[in-house]
């Protein structure tokens, strides 16, 4: 009988205290135009006796944030998101809108800003949790009463319209996905059901000027199979094939295109090129199969080119190095892109198997110690190393004011400093990718390896403090 391994070790070991610190020390110079908050979400275990499933995706949500203002690092905060289970464990009152503890889930996957609200997100049919500016939990949100059920972990913001697009799935028995569109004012203005009888797991989507790109791949929701193993509710099922869909943004019918069986957590970007739709993804040959994260299942950066005339998909390998957390300049989302950024050898690879039976047998890969900048036009790349013991994760791209090109901007990411036993917020020039950091904000504590985050600029107000 196998033993489920506790995934909250190494870079993912939990932080036990909530900390507030002001006027953080800085090496270098923070660009004066960076006025806002860099927030990052991720799982945080609370106590060994906790009965929650021992899978990384089930950890309690903790958001870590740094506020930058006028060239200074004004504060650092880390806060557990007060879902019903967390509030109960801490002896606090439940927050408004929280579902009962028995149906609770940690909104631990992403944190975004939209319509002057800060939202902690998770997929699987659960609502976002709204946070205050200081990342205290306000309560579960429903987009002003317009959200029909759950939301998603990976919405895409259209830089042209200001609309937020999401593909959602539910953990109940419903055999559908749903395309949701949230207006710039924070109201759901479109909800289109997408029939999918095999209940695929969908973590991300992509967006073009005319289509929402839907991923219906070989990971299938299987709550009953996985609850007994206390792990993530998904299984690998390549017998039903894999496909990607193009849903017109003003229509209701998806056109499907077959691809080789695989799984994709994250898309880099997508765009249209005449009668073709180009979709760049981080692709796994297998996932959720028990011991799936092996030498045959490392994630690679691939391109799907969908020919809407012939109905075929050409699959091309762009980079065969193991990598995750792809990102682009948000100004090019849905349009043609030249540059992309990803994280090498992320510790996430050691935790993605649906069962934890084989985690201990996986190779002790370097804990996200490097970033890659891809130049897809020149078919080249540059690697930035952070050094042994220094782990990082996803980067957020912030365009420079008056940017002259696609890579004219800043990259923000947390980097663990083993000499201090704490983390830094590192600000890089996206153009001078391997140059010295523009600024390093020294945090008082360690930020565990986590999932996704965002740069949320301050509203433009005369009284910003």
Image: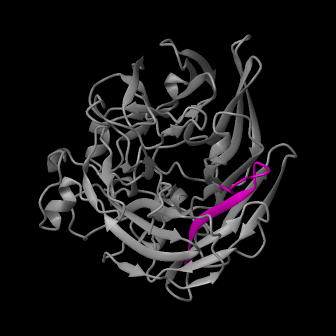
200 displayed left or right of 213: left
Residue found at the very far front of the displayed protein: 462
Position of residue 232 relative to residue 364, above or below, is above
Query: What residue appears at the point 63 percent right and 56 percent down from the top-left corner?
Result: 398
Q: Is residue 414 magenta?
A: yes
Query: What residue appears at the point 55 percent right and 77 percent down from the top-left corner?
Result: 72
Q: Position of residue 133 (x, y in %)?
A: 36, 61
Image quarter where the C terminus lies is bottom left
456 displayed left or right of 398: left
Residue 150 seen in this snapshot:
yes
Position of residue 203 relative to residue 89, above or below, is above
Asked where in the image residue 284 lies, by quadrant, the reply is: top right
Residue found at the very far bottom of the displayed protein: 419
Image quarter where the N terminus lies is bottom left
Query: What residue appears at the point 60 percent right and 67 percent down from the top-left corner?
Result: 365
Q: Position of residue 433 (x, y in %)?
A: 76, 64
Q: Which residues are magenta?
A: 399-416
Foreground of the two, 276 or 27: 27
Q: Position of residue 95 (x, y in %)?
A: 18, 54
């Amino acid at each position: 009988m196998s033993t489920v391994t506790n995934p909250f070790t190494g870079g993912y070991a939990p932080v036990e205290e909530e900390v507030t610190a002001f006027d953080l020390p800085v090496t270098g110079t923070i660009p004066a135009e960076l006025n806002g908050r860099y927030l990052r979400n991720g799982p945080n275990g609370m106590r060994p006796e906790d009965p929650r499933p021992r899978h990384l995706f089930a950890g309690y949500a903790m958001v870590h944030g740094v506020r930058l203002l006028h060239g200074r690092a004004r504060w650092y905060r880390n806060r557990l998101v007060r879902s019903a289970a967390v509030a109960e464990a801490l002896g606090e009152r439940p927050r408004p809108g929280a579902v009962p503890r028995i149906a609770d889930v940690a909104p631990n996957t992403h944190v975004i800003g939209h319509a002057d609200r800060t939202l902690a997100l998770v997929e699987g049919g659960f609502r976002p949790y709204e946070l205050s500016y200081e990342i205290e939990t306000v309560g579960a949100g429903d987009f002003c009463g317009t959200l029909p059920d759950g939301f998603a972990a990976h919405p895409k913001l259209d830089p042209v319209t200001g609309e937020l697009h999401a593909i959602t799935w539910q953990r109940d028995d419903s055999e559908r996905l749903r395309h949701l569109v949230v207006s710039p004012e924070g109201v759901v203005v479109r909800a289109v059901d997408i029939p999918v009888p095999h209940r695929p797991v969908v973590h991300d989507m992509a967006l073009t000027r005319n289509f929402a790109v839907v991923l219906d791949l070989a990971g299938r929701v299987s709550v009953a199979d996985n609850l007994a193993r206390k792990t993530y509710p998904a299984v690998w099922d390549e017998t039903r094939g894999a496909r990607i869909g193009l849903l017109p943004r003003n229509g209701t019918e998806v056109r499907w295109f077959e691809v080789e069986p695989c799984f994709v957590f994250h898309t880099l970007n997508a765009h249209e090129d005449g009668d073709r739709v180009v979709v760049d993804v981080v692709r796994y040959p297998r996932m959720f199969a028990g011991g799936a994260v092996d030498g045959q299942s490392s994630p690679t950066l691939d391109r799907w080119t969908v020919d809407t005339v012939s109905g075929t998909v050409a699959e091309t390998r762009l980079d065969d190095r193991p990598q995750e957390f792809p990102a682009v300049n948000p100004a090019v989302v849905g349009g043609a892109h030249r540059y992309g950024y990803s994280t090498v050898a992320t510790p996430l690879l050691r935790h993605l198997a649906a069962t934890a039976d084989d985690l201990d047998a996986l190779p002790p890969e370097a804990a996200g110690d490097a970033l890659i900048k891809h130049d897809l036009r020149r078919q080249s790349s540059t690697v930035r190393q952070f050094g042994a013991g220094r782990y990082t994760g996803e980067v957020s791209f912030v365009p420079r004011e008056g940017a002259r090109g696609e890579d004219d901007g800043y990259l923000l990411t947390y980097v663990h400093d083993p000499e201090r036993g704490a983390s830094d917020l590192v600000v890089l020039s996206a153009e001078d990718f391997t140059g010295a950091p523009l600024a390093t904000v020294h945090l008082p504590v360690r930020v565990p390896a986590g999932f996704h985050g965002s740069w949320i600029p301050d509203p433009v107000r005369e009284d910003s403090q």
